[in-house]
Image (cartoon, helix red, strand yellow):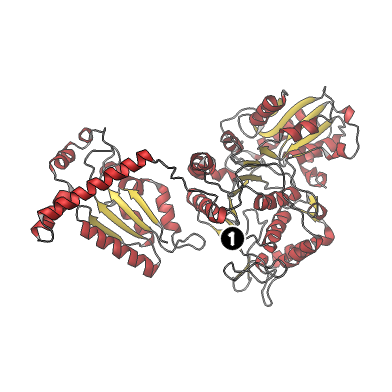
Amino acid sequence: MIPLIIHGDSAISGQGIVYEMVNLSQLEGYTTGGTVHVVVNNLIGFTTIPEDARSSRYCTDVAKVAGAPVLHVNGEDPEAVVAAAQMAIEYRQRFRKDVFIDMWCYRRYGHNEQDEASFTQPIMAGLIKRKPSTMKVYAERLLAEGVLTDSDMKTIRTRLDESLEQAQDAAKSSPYDPTIDPGSARWSGVQRTFSFDSPKTAISEAMLKEICDGLGRVPEGFKVNPKLERVLEGRRSLPQTKDISYADAESLAFGSLLLEGTPIRLSGQDSRRGTFSHRHAVLRDFKTGAPFIPLNGMRPEWEPGEGQFDPATQQAHMCVYDSPLSEASVVGIDYGYSLADPSMLVMWEAQFGDFVNGAQVIIDQFIASAEAKWERWSGLVMLLPHGYEGAGPEHSSARMERFLKLCAGDNMQIVHPSTGPQIFHLLRRQAKQSFRKPLIVFTPKSMLRIPTGTTDELTSGHFLELIDDPRFVAGSNRKAVTRVVLCAGKFYHELAARRDEIGRDDIAIVRVEQLYPFHAQLCKEILARYPKSAELVFAQEEPRNAGGALFILDRLRETLGLEGKYMGRSASPTPAVGSKRVHKQEQHELIDDIIGPVPTEAPETTQGKVAQATK
């Protein structure tokens, strides 16, 4: 199987993703072993002539990025085209690198049969109009060389016309859907329909201990970076210390899936270490720089071509790659991986969630819509760091509202988990559920290493789409509640910290962990536990026209007949302010409005108590 991409001359030089793919062509984790690029060069892009389409002489000059050879060939010379194709294939097979064929052609009828090419290229259109067809030119050449006779040519033309007529008649009489069945081969057994029913995601104490031992172990002679020795020790001791952070839970989820035979692929600009130094999936020898992946050292690795996986003695392989500074092409590649193998957990992580807008074309054209357009299923996971800590407009928002506006027909899962155990069960659910839907996860930044749960929550339970207020679950008086606040993500911890600080027993805080598909029945059950007279609020730190507020308030109204009040920042054309001081003031005033003010303490007090409140 050889990768083949067919380009137009305007597209290959104009679409930046072509450059990105050439740049990726020889990188670990992204190479295809060489792609053959065929450019159908018609010397125009609809109405844009070459002089307006590029600065370089040739449309294929993008190939110079990787030193890939370019074969320029006359499209009117069939034998030369065939020779170029053979040479390109032989080059690819021998050197495992990209190769380009620039086939110079022309459009006899313009962009389509209804287009008038002479409006844009009058001289070219005139030349083409007077030019005999390629078939005629080639036929005359063969006749002149004595290769064919007039009778032979007549027979060939007749046979060609008849075959085209037969094909058209067959298409009219027996039309068929050319869509590739995604349920065949590796997709056999995968269901089409979304369900809130969760597979078993809890693990045993023995598996938990084995993963923790593996996370804290390095090969003999491996020199660990001194700053990471405490990290490895902390991972080893998790079964005893019990408290786990989001970062811990993520690694434990990966380890458990590997031990159960699910291979994992994770890529992104800082995926190996993690943008916030929270993951350390790949360790580097402090003296030699040699890499080591602890999660690949728990047991001997199973090779898919070497018989059945043994869950007692083997583990699957984890691939983790640092990608180039790109979103569109890398997300596109990982989306492709997810189409090819539903049994692998495929993930892409943004450096900051804001940067996902660089992949918006892939999201719009494929991730959100491919199931409806082409019945192609994908289990791709997108990890998007999101949250307001005063980092500014380009480092705060993963644009949750954009994803939610694309949601319909259970096409994606939009999740904003607030604790470590939640991300643990979520990732395992994604790999184990009977269907495949893209999973968009809004991950924390400042709270990555703050304990938000215990290991006991990993050996029992499952992912919760909504979480009732633990204060009232424990037995506090629900009848005294005058306001029920719905919120998502790390904002819960800030609100809960303020509530504990000032002793508000009349406010309940319910977390919406999965915004879409929205679990209306579970929401109804939780809200029914509180007085009907209680004010219903959706609170968020994002501006009104961002985040999940408008979407969730609409869901409450449409599915439950409930009117909720919005509490958050005013609408804004930018995701966040550019001043940390202004951000802190805004956040302080926002929490004042939702929970209540602290009369005697400075704005920073609540922020400082978030970590304590999570315990």
Q: For the N terminus, which image quadrant?
A: bottom left
Q: Nearer the viewer, residue 46 or 285?
A: 46
Residue 443 pos. (x, y %): 66, 46
Residue 116, image quadrant: top left
Nearer the observer, 18 or 446: 18
**Rendering quarter of residue 132:** top left
Category of crowding for the residue at label 1, using alpha-carbon neighbours closer than 10 angstroms: few (below 14), some (14–19), many (at least 20): many
Numbered circles on residues, count: 1
At label 1, which amino acid type do we have? Val
556 horizontally vs 160: left or right: right
Is any atom of residue 529 visible in this view? yes
Q: Residue at x 23, y 38 (%)?
A: 109
Q: Residue at x 68, y 46 (%)?
A: 444
Image coords of residue 428 (percent x, y): 69, 53
Where disc 1 sits, the SS reads strand
In the depicted view, which residue is nearer to us: 316 or 144?
A: 144
Would residue 234 be visible to someone looking at this image?
no
Residue sticking out furthest to the front: 173
Q: Give residue 344's quadrant in the image.
A: bottom right
- Residue at x 74%, y 33% (from the top left corner): 521
Q: Which residue is mark 1?
A: 320
Q: Position of residue 222 (x, y in %)?
A: 66, 74
> For the view shown, which residue lies furthest in the bottom direction?
221
Q: Position of residue 378 (x, y in %)?
A: 56, 48
447 vs 328, left or right, is right
Looking at the image, residue 599 sits to the left or right of residue 54; the answer is right
